[in-house]
Amino acid sequence: MSPNAPYPPQSPIDPSKALSCPRCSAPAQPSTAVQRCARCGGAFTLQVGYALDPSTPLPPYDRALPSIKVKASVQMVLQTGTVAPEGVMLGELDPVIGLVATNEAGVMFPDVGSVAVHRTVDFVSLVVAVLVPLPIAGGLTLIAMQPKTPIGFLVVAGLFGLLAAWMIYRAAFIKKHFVRIVGRYRTLSVRFDTPLRRRRAFHDELLRRAGIAPSPIP
Ligand SMILES: [Zn+2]
């Protein structure tokens, strides 16, 4: 769509909100490529959906499509994100058993104004990794280096070292994945990197079912 195309007058979506950086809300233009924000310098993708551009090739509704669920703790609240056949949903999980989604809210695919994706370093996990498994691995290695120490100490030190390395890699290189969906009636922000194996399917199916061209996770 050309940036100067008129928006449908019936759309209550505010283009200044839909066409903005998901990190700092600076104005941005849609693109299938990963872009960098002129204001904050962060990488993100931004594409428009059917509610802002009616020429978006929305696929026909197919109730047989599987739902793809992700789960994340966001500001101490356990949330679920779901790419369903009819739209994308965000729910808060019951804080006691963490299984029943409450306050579920969704954006139907024809109501998607824009989809924006970005990743951020998980500083909390990074600090936990540096404060917990890393010193344990170091301490056990020091003990293991003493003469006549059972080999088990070295094995356990290695396991804690692997755990620390994985936590640091997860937090600093894979990072937290967020998608912002600006819809006709509401805006959702979904963290979608847990479980890791589902993040690609969640992202790609969300775009595909919304009729949006495939794009990389930035
Ligand atoms: Zn920005």
Image (cartoon, rainbow, N blue to C red):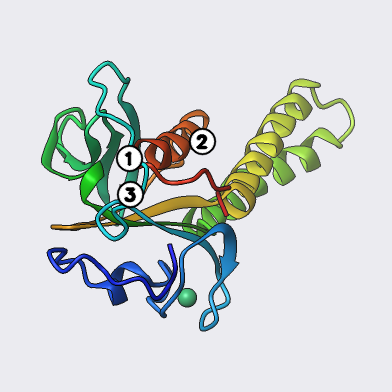
Q: Which residue, as the protein is rendered here, is positioned at the far bottom?
A: 39
Task: Using a 10 Å C-alpha cutoff, classify the residue at mark 3 as few (fewer than 14 neighbours), some (14 to 19) or many (20 or more).
Answer: many
Question: Looking at the image, is mark 3 or mark 1 earlier in the sequence?
Answer: 1
- Using the image, determine if residue 7 lies above or below residue 133: below
- The residue closer to the viewer here, 170 or 187, is 187
Q: Amino acid at mark 3?
A: Val
- Which residue is identified by label 1? 58
Q: CA distance from mark 2 to mark 3?
A: 14 Å
* Secondary structure of residue under mark 1: loop
Residue at image position (37%, 70%) is 19
- The residue closer to the viewer here, 23 or 133, is 23
Task: State whether label 3 is within 8 Å of ligand 1.
Answer: no
- Which residue is identified by label 2? 200
Q: Amino acid at mark 1?
A: Leu
Q: CA distance from mark 2 to mark 1?
A: 20 Å
Q: CA distance from mark 3 to mark 1?
A: 21 Å
* Secondary structure of residue under mark 2: helix
Q: Nearer the viewer, mark 3 or mark 1?
A: 1
- Residue 122 lies, in percent from the top left, at 50, 56
- Which residue is identified by label 3? 190
Q: Amino acid at mark 2?
A: Arg
How many badges with numbers are in the image? Answer: 3
- The residue closer to the viewer here, 37 or 150, is 37
